[in-house]
Image: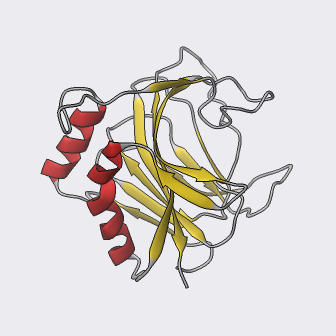
């Protein structure tokens, strides 16, 4: 994968698979006789940071990454649902070997705000050599903003802005800072995986 590369692809997976993911995450379809469960997070971007913006939402972790040891662990059976999506991402990028580092879903509710303020610019993991698979479960406002910067900055410059649309995926170099705008109209639901490049 090229450094700094960004791909935005619509209808990345077929409609049946799109609907299966959406219905499962919205609690309308069971997987292995279980309904999907969401967990409260006090801030979607910096859930455990005392200085976070306090933009609450719901999350579900499929694969947990330990920054200290650099190891990953599958902690949700629902992870299996997204394996075809991840294989297709690797195939699209012509990546032979990738390690699943982290996988999560987020659900944000509309906020009654007039002025949209972006969430905190961030990278998903503090490590080199990984890429992001960001899949939109449903149409929404609350764009993903991808910056040019690969280091923390006082001023970020926008490279690309992507609007959530069902079936759309954004694949990009994990070292690029990015953020989300808050949703003010409809729920914003996405699947977010980080895949390490295996040499």
Q: Is residue 138 above or below residue 70?
A: above
> Which part of the image, by quadrant, shows the C terminus?
bottom right
Q: Position of residue 55 (x, y in %)?
A: 62, 24
What residue lies at 70% left-to-right and 64% top-to-bottom?
127
Circle count: 0
What residue lies at 50% left-to-right and 53% top-to-bottom?
73
Is the image coloured rainbow, by chain, by secondary structure, or in one colour? secondary structure
Q: Position of residue 95 (x, y in %)?
A: 42, 80
Q: Is residue 126 above or below residue 99?
A: above
What residue lies at 70% left-to-right and 32% top-to-bottom?
48
Q: Position of residue 138 (x, y in %)?
A: 32, 38
Within the image, what quadrant is residue 118 found in? Answer: top right
Q: Position of residue 128 (x, y in %)?
A: 68, 70
What residue lies at 38% left-to-right and 73% top-to-bottom?
90
Q: Is residue 175 above or below residue 182?
A: below
Q: Seen from this angle, which residue lies furthest left?
A: 16
Q: Nearer the viewer, residue 41 or 163?
A: 41
Q: Nearer the viewer, residue 109 or 20?
A: 20
Residue 73 is left or right of residue 45, and the answer is left
Q: Nearer the viewer, residue 41 or 112?
A: 41
Residue 107 is left or right of residue 111, and the answer is left
Q: Seen from this angle, which residue lies furthest top?
A: 112
């Amino acid at each position: 994968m090229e450094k700094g590369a960004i791909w935005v692809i619509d209808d990345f997976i077929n409609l049946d698979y799109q609907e299966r993911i959406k219905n499962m995450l919205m609690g309308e379809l069971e997987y292995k006789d279980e309904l999907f469960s969401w967990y409260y997070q006090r801030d979607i971007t910096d859930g455990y940071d005392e200085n976070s913006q306090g933009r609450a939402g719901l999350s579900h972790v499929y694969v947990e990454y330990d920054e200290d040891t650099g190891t990953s662990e599958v902690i949700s059976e629902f992870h299996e649902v997204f394996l075809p999506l991840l294989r297709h991402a690797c195939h699209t990028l012509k990546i032979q070997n990738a390690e699943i580092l982290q996988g999560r879903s987020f659900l944000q509710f509309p906020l009654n705000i007039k002025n949209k303020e972006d969430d905190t610019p961030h990278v998903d993991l503090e490590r080199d050599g990984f890429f992001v698979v960001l899949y939109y479960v449903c149409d929404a406002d609350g764009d993903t903003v991808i910056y040019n910067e690969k280091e923390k900055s006082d001023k970020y410059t926008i490279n690309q802005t992507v609007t959530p649309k069902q079936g759309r995926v954004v694949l990009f170099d994990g070292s690029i800072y990015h953020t989300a705008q808050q949703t003010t109209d409809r729920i914003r639901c996405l699947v977010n995986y980080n895949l390490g490049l295996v040499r």
